[in-house]
Image (cartoon, rainbow, N blue to C red):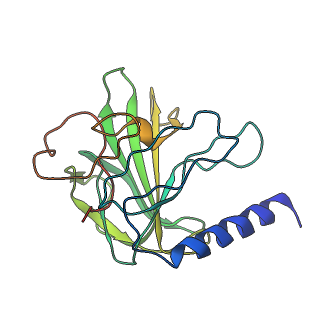
Amino acid sequence: MNLAVRWVCAIAASLAIVACDSEERGRAHWYRADATNPIDVEMPAGALYISQQFFQPSAGPPHAGIDIIGPRGTPILAAAPGKVVASHYEPLYGNRIRLDHGVDGQGRRVFTQYYHMDKRFRRVGDRVRRGQVIGHLGSTGVLGLANHLHFEVHRGVSEAEAVPRDPHLFWVNGVGKVTCFRAGLGGVAQGLTFPTPCS
């Protein structure tokens, strides 16, 4: 069995296990033992379970974001104000949206990506507010083996040069401090909020 098939099987098994408890909240799975820069993650009690963390190995396939497990149809929220630069279906990741959040305080562009959506509610060119519903959580695409949101953050001097970064570096409340969206955070210029509602 080749390496790619083994990775897909491992991911499928992991998602199948955590999908059984799809409404678990307030907990994040640990980073892999060989992760180079693990972050201490503080989860609000009402935030959906993070089943897999960001991972960029020196060899082998990366996991370029975090996986958030939840029931099909859970609203997916824009993590910050921005503009839709991609909204389409693709075979591996299913329904996906990419948002451009503009330039951060260090002169780098920040993008967020939302994969495996059951439904997309925004089109290319749409402007979105922080916390605005952009779609529903689902399991579309070959890699959408269980209901979950694969959420990525990319940062770079341009869209073409933006590289995946650990989403836990960008929360409004600080590194590793997962921040739930709430009224009053809509006008915050920097940082991200959790891309699903907290109870």
**Above or below: residue 196 compared with residue 172:** below
**Above or below: residue 35 compared with residue 144:** above
Outermost residue on the left side: it is: 184
Q: Which residue is drawn at 28% across and 52% down?
A: 125
Outermost residue on the right side: it is: 1
Q: Can residue 141 be seen in this view?
A: no
Q: Is residue 21 left or right of residue 170?
A: right
Question: How far across and how far down the image is residue 55, in percent?
Answer: 61, 44
Toward which corner of the image does residue 153 lie, by quadrant?
A: top left
Q: Residue at x 26, y 52 (%)?
A: 180
On-image quarter of the C terminus: bottom left
Q: In front here: 53 or 91?
A: 53
Q: Which residue is drawn at 31% across and 22% down?
A: 105
On-image quarter of the N terminus: bottom right
Question: How far across and how far down the image is residue 40, in percent?
Answer: 47, 39
**Above or below: residue 62 compared with residue 51:** above
Question: How far across and how far down the image is residue 73, in percent?
Answer: 34, 77
Looking at the image, how many numbered discs can be counted on the residues? 0
Q: In this view, does 22 lie to the left or right of 105?
A: right
Q: In front here: 51 or 73?
A: 51
Toward which corner of the image does residue 12 lie, by quadrant?
A: bottom right
Question: How far across and how far down the image is residue 163, in percent?
Answer: 54, 36
**Above or below: residue 106 compared with residue 66:** above
Q: In front here: 199 or 83?
A: 199
Q: Is residue 26 visible?
A: yes
